[in-house]
């Protein structure tokens, strides 16, 4: 595998929401800064297709623990309400993010696959040296996404979001 290509397989357990409630959040890119604000600093819709529509696109700016920002486009690629969210990304990195949702008790289990190729020239050049740091940066952001999603859904349930 080239040093600028990554694959991450993870899972989240979200007791605060049903698969449909979790899907409603994951399928709406504009909500990312509200629940995953540790990473997603800004998301701007690029079309008027609406939320949860295949082909809808948004421009995103994100940052992990390392001192660089990533700019990219998010495009909804495959959406099955209550079950599946797949998005493509283009820009500083090209990739495919896939979230499969299944009921788990009164909540939701989410299996995540993130396949990404770093394309930003300086990061691509440094990837052979910084591959472990890039992977660590991803592992830093992911638990914050899970925790943020749980908080966001709990606040929604309590009428505070």
Image: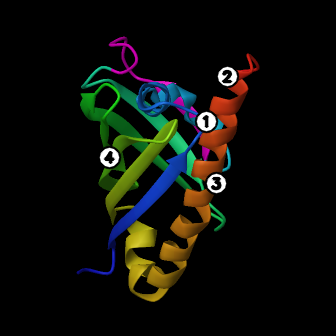
Q: Residue furthest front?
A: 105
Position in image of residue 109 (x %, y %): 44, 47
Image side of residue 35 versus residue 84, left or right: right
Q: Earlier in the sequence, mark 2 or mark 1?
A: 1
Tell me the element at label 4.
strand
Residue designated by label 4: 90
Tell me the element at label 2.
helix
Residue designated by label 3: 144
Discs 1/4, front: 1
Circle 1: is it few (<14), some (14-19), or many (20+) Cα within 10 Å? many
Residue designated by label 2: 157
Q: Residue at x 44, y 81 (%)?
A: 131
Q: Earlier in the sequence, mark 4 or mark 3?
A: 4
Discs 3/2, front: 2
Discs 1/3, front: 1
Image quarter of the N terminus: bottom left
Q: Residue at x 45, y 70 (%)?
A: 122
Could you tell me how far apart the alpha carbons at marks 4 and 3 are, in whole angstroms? 23 Å
Q: Residue at x 35, y 46 (%)?
A: 99
Discs 2/4, front: 2
Q: Are marks 2 and 1 in contact (CB under 8 Å)?
A: yes
Q: Are marks 2 and 4 in contact (CB under 8 Å)?
A: no
Q: Earlier in the sequence, mark 1 or mark 4?
A: 1
Residue 2 shows in the view: yes
Position in image of residue 78 (x %, y %): 23, 34
Q: Is residue 116 magenta?
A: no
Tell me the element at label 3.
helix
Q: Number of numbered discs present?
A: 4
Could you tell me how far apart the alpha carbons at marks 3 and 2 are, in whole angstroms? 20 Å
Residue designated by label 1: 16
Image quarter of the C terminus: top right
């Amino acid at each position: 595998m080239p040093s600028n290509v990554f694959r991450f397989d993870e899972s989240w357990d979200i007791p605060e929401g049903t698969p449909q409630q979790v899907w409603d959040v994951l399928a709406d890119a504009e909500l990312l800064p509200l629940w995953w604000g540790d990473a997603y600093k800004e998301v701007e819709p690029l079309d008027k297709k609406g939320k949860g529509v295949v082909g809808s696109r948004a421009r995103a700016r994100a940052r992990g623990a390392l001192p660089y920002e990533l700019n990219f486009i998010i495009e909804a690629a495959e959406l099955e309400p209550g079950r599946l969210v797949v998005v493509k990304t283009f820009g500083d990195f090209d990739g495919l993010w896939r979230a499969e949702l299944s009921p788990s008790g009164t909540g939701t289990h989410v299996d995540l696959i993130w396949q990404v190729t770093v394309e930003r020239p300086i990061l691509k050049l440094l990837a052979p040296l910084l591959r472990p740091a890039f992977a660590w940066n991803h592992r830093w952001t992911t638990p914050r996404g899970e925790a943020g999603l749980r908080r966001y859904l709990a606040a929604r349930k309590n009428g505070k979001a």
